[in-house]
Amino acid sequence: MAVPFAVRTGDLPKRAASALVMVAIAGTALWLGGIWWSTFCGAVAVIGIWELLRISRRLKIDGWKQGAIFLIGTFYIAAAGYCLANLPYEVVLGVVAIVIATDTGAYFSGRAIGGPKIAPRISPSKTWAGLAGGATAAALVSFGFFYSNVGERAFSLIGLAALGIGAGLAVVAQAGDFLESGMKRKAAVKDSSNLIPGHGGVLDRVDGLLPVAIVAALLWYNVHPS
């Protein structure tokens, strides 16, 4: 049954207020840097692990499988938190910008174009057109960050690499989204928790950011091993 538009948008003020608070807290922690940013990343990881425990305990599978999923997920979340806490400031900004661009591009292109779904049983709203739009937006944002750092050199092979990295990270972000959506669907829960009014839980907000942070760290430290 379709939900009336007024009902679906009735919590918009609450969602907007929550989003502003989240941006303010995260932005302040990142601006202060050092122990403040590390503490923020650690807190987000701890809450995410708690939400993972909540989800995994509701999976209708054997207890040992629940435990294995929780342990693997804990390592995954902790690794992402560590990467975010230790990546350079400008790389963190780039990672966050790419994830936001992916979500925004996917939303608008998916709504405008529609078409075949990627995995309707996991996430009914995700389409191939949305993924293409998200990848395009992320590629352009990635190129913009490269251009701001290297100037005209971006219009060369390094620029093509930047476009490819952005598009690839968009796919990674979408994979993270599908991973969490699939777990929630199997656990029969709508949100990872209700900690953030109008937004659900922490994992609902950072599901795409987690894998992108890990991949971005691997790329960064491969280029800058010191």
Image (cartoon, rainbow, N blue to C red):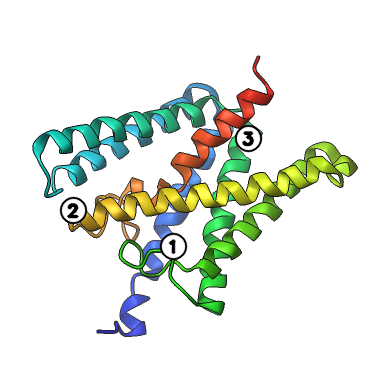
Report the amino acid beneath label 2: Ala
- The numbered disc on residue 206 is none
The residue at the far top in this view is 226
Which-is-in-front pick, marks 2 and 3?
Answer: 2
Q: In this view, does 48 lie above or below 102?
A: above
The first of marks 3 and 1 along the sequence is 1
Q: Position of residue 113 (x, y in %)?
A: 56, 78
Mark 2 or mark 3, which has the lower sequence index? 3
Q: Is mark 2 on a helix, strand or loop?
A: helix
Rendered image: mark on residue 187: 2
Q: Is residue 186 above or below residue 76?
A: below
Label 3: how many residues lie within 10 Å, few (<14), some (14-19) or many (20+)?
some
- List x then y, in percent, for residue 1: 24, 84
Residue at (57%, 60%) from the top-left corner? Answer: 134
Q: Quadrant of the C terminus?
A: top right
Q: Tell me whether the residue at label 2 lies in contact with that at label 3, contact meaning CB atoms closer than 8 angstroms.
A: no
The residue that label 1 is drawn on is 16
Residue at 83 percent across and 37 percent down: it is 150
Kindly report which numbered mark, 1 or 2, lies closer to the viewer in this rendering. 2
Q: Is mark 3 on a helix, strand or loop?
A: helix
Residue density around tag 2, few if under 14, some if 14–19, many if 20 or more, within 10 Å: some
Q: Residue 38, percent across and down?
A: 46, 26
At 79% from the left edge and 37% from the top edge, which residue is drawn?
149
Q: In which quarter of the image is residue 41?
A: top left
